[in-house]
Amino acid sequence: MKSFLLTATALFTFAGSLFAQNLITEYSWELGANIGASTITRPLGPADPYQGTRTKIVADYSLRLNYYINPNWLLNVDIGSRKWESFGTWQEPTLFGQNLPTRQVAFLEASHAISENAGISYVVPFYDKYNRYNSANLYFGATIGLINTINDGSTSFSVYKTAPDSGIQYLSGYNYSSGMGYSFGLQTGFTYYILPRLGVNIDLAVRYAHIKTIEDNWRSENATFYLLYFPETIGVRWRF
């Protein structure tokens, strides 16, 4: 009887050890940083000559804090920054009966467009083959928040350096004033965990931004503008 009890105790201990190894370690919080690229649409709202006709790709940076309510639902707070700029072509006035050539004008909507967003996402979790830990997350969701644009509302000039008068100046840069507004949009991403706590991430989003500027000199031209922007970033995640 004594040997039977010892054998049973050993078996239960071994089984409990195996079971404990298969328990999935869950982490509720996640901190991350992302870097990548962002593009914008032409800003609407201002008069046509002040919108530009094309934009360019710029750097996009963000910090993120995630909270997993459960394995399938995620709340997040995201703080990011990027530059918003568009470009157009202006026909300069006639001088001495001669048409001056067109010149490119840069419209700087924001030297820094700083976003503060909160979001909710549905998560599709994946686990390692031994079912020990969550090895990857695919998520889809929505986000809403505030946008602050930092800019100085200035203008800049260049000179032609060609005939008919090499000293003629033209407006080459037009900066919107600083402003504040709101944004909302959709987001999706995928995180793969190299280690149980450390992961690499790709994040894609589309957001609408509506900005009211603090405009004194050009109130009728760019007091309000709105656009879409598209952050596409990669980053790291640390779970705790």
Image: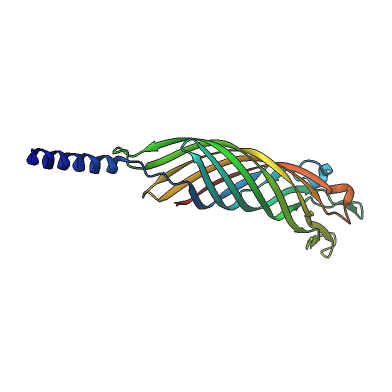
In the rendered structure, the answer to whether residue 129 lies left or right of residue 155 reads left
Q: Position of residue 115 (x, y in %)?
A: 66, 50
Q: Position of residue 40 (x, y in %)?
A: 67, 44
Residue 42 visible, this orientation: no
Q: Can you tell which quarter of the image residue 137 is in?
A: top left
Nearest the viewer among 121 and 203 is 121
In the rendered structure, the answer to whether residue 196 lies left or right of residue 92 reads left
Q: Residue at x 41, y 44 (%)?
A: 26
Nearest the viewer among 156 and 129 is 129
Q: How many labels does the image show?
A: 0
**Where, quadrant-wise, is the N terminus in this rendering?**
top left
Vertical position of residue 211 compared to residue 111: above or below: above
In the rendered structure, the answer to whether residue 203 lies left or right of residue 144 reads left
Picture colour scheme: rainbow
Q: Where is residue 235 in the image (x, y as percent from the top left)?
A: 49, 51
Q: Which residue is drawn at 29% across and 39% down?
A: 130
Q: Which residue is drawn at 60% across and 49% down?
A: 78
Q: Where is residue 161 in the image (x, y as percent from the top left)?
A: 78, 63
Nearest the viewer among 219 and 212 is 212
